[in-house]
Image (tube, rainbow, N blue to C red):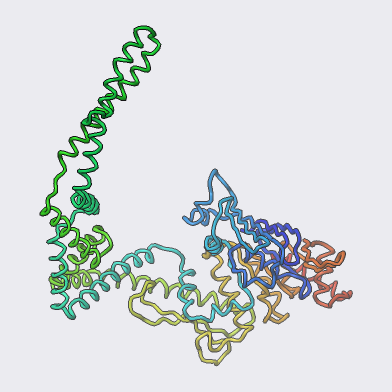
Amino acid sequence: MLVQLHIQNFALMDNLAIEFDPSLNVLTGETGAGKSILLDAIRFVLGERMDALKAGVSAKAFSVEAVFDPGKKIRKLDLLSTYFENDEEVLILRRETSLEGRSRAWANGRMVNISALKELGAFLIDIHGQYDHQLLLDQSQHLDLLDRFVGADDIGQKYEALFAEYSALLKHREELASLEAGREREIDILKFQIDEITQAKLKNDDEVAELEKERVRFANAEKLYESVSALTALLDEDDDSVTTLLGKARPRFNELLKFDDSMADLKKEFETVETSLAEIARSLQHYRDSLTFEPDRLRQIEARLDAIYLLKKKYGGSVEKILEFYAEARKKYDSIVNAEVYGRETEQKISRLLPKISALADELSEKRKKAAQSLKKTIERELKDLGIDHARFECQFDAIDFSPAGRDRVEFMISPNLGQPILPLRKIISAGEVSRVMLAMKKALAKVDPVETLIFDEIDANIGGRMGTVTGEKLKEIAGERQVLLITHLPQIASFADRHFKVTKVARQGKTSTEYQVIAGEARVKELAQMMSGKSESDISRKHAEEMLAQAENLV
């Protein structure tokens, strides 16, 4: 349920805070007053694309914040549950756009992307505009609408799981069939690739790094020997080596200590340096003695590296990638060689699965057909109340192959007039009729649809004043199950509001803005009277407005 909306600098709205009633909220006002801007603001905070809202968007930086009180069922959904921590009771969505046009959004204080807003919005609000009835005329939407009327159950979930398994088996069968074509040539290629990589006996990329280091050492053995020999001579082997000089310095330190023991620490440091240099000299001598030049080993290393580089060029840029290719090639080779065996196994699995998925699809179809009969009665009853007395409504079922949604193709059919053949909804229905069918559908879905807030943008656009009272009654009934926000020009519908907002455009100090005011009592009588007779209300229109409000109160 939408509890509150706070809007800043959005089109003609400078700073607007609105609280909504849990039931039927009605917005009225003259054409151009700014009623639809409120819906643009709601669409904006629910992630609507900016270019779709440009008519209602300000050139300034602007923001919209919406406070929702989701029902327990909605709150438990995985998508929404992540936003409820520390026993939070409400969901606060906020979206703002900077002067530079950058958009940012938050859900309960956590920054989210626009896609997340749209996902959340799908569970929170269902907006039905003047032209949204096109969805009702789209046959591809009919099965989904019927399933919403059926309600959530585990049959559909079980079917989806089996269908995923069934689809995977069909895909595997197709892959095996495609492998069978050109089988011998593919086997030869794969066998060559597998043998080539097998013979290389690859280990890992560390082996390559070690081989490259070893190659450098062997290729530069003579230079290494010369350099290390020069170092050992300087440190230990020449007459004037560092070691010899340090040996001459040692007695001098001993003499110093005879007369001044404060030099003891310095002597220890000297001895540490002497020991370290001796260790370095011994290590260098050992390294020099280990240096050898082995032409055969160098050739082996270069041959090994050349072989690995060639495999990298063919099968991947690293040993890891080559081994991945090798594993896939082995798997594919095995599939081709044993295609007949795997084919029989796959067919057996499909044969075992078919009765199960067929039974679930049939069960799902039966449940849908029962729901279709219930929907037929509900729609026909609602349409009769809405002035289409002899309407016949049907859900036509056609059997199709297994699909993610079952084996049913559903299309809504209607005959709005007595003696008229029943035809697809998209072919026969008028604009006024489709508005009433949509209202009837919303009424039918009100008890099962999880979305708690319905918004109707001038659903009465193609409904005559004669049917306004009945339409208002239907909207009031829907508001008993769901929160409803409604823009209307019909006073008969407006009279049923639990909270009535009057929208006006005001010019002050050279600036135009839109204001929303909750009206009741005398102000509401005046608004309904003006809706009937124009700006100048009459005694007759006032009396009629009072009668409408009294009648609506009695019908509730």
The quadrant the N terminus occupies is: bottom right
| Res. 420 image quadrant | bottom right
Q: Foreground: 364 or 335?
A: 335
Across and down, in percent, residue 56 comes to: 69, 70
Across and down, in percent, residue 240 comes to: 26, 28
Asked if one can make out residue 491 in the rendered structure from this viewpoint, the answer is yes
Q: Foreground: 240 or 546?
A: 240
What residue appears at the point 77 percent right and 67 percent down from the top-left corner?
503
> Compared to 396, does 323 lie above or below?
above
Across and down, in percent, residue 11 comes to: 73, 67
State the count of labels. 0
What residue appears at the point 24 percent right and 54 percent down from the top-left corner?
205
Residue furthest front as drawn = 239
> Compared to 147, does 257 lie above or below?
above
Residue furthest left as drawn = 296
What residue appears at the point 26 percent right and 33 percent down from the top-left corner?
234
The quadrant the C terminus occupies is: bottom right
**Does residue 393 appear to the left or right of 198 in the view shown?**
right
Q: Foreground: 274 or 326?
A: 274
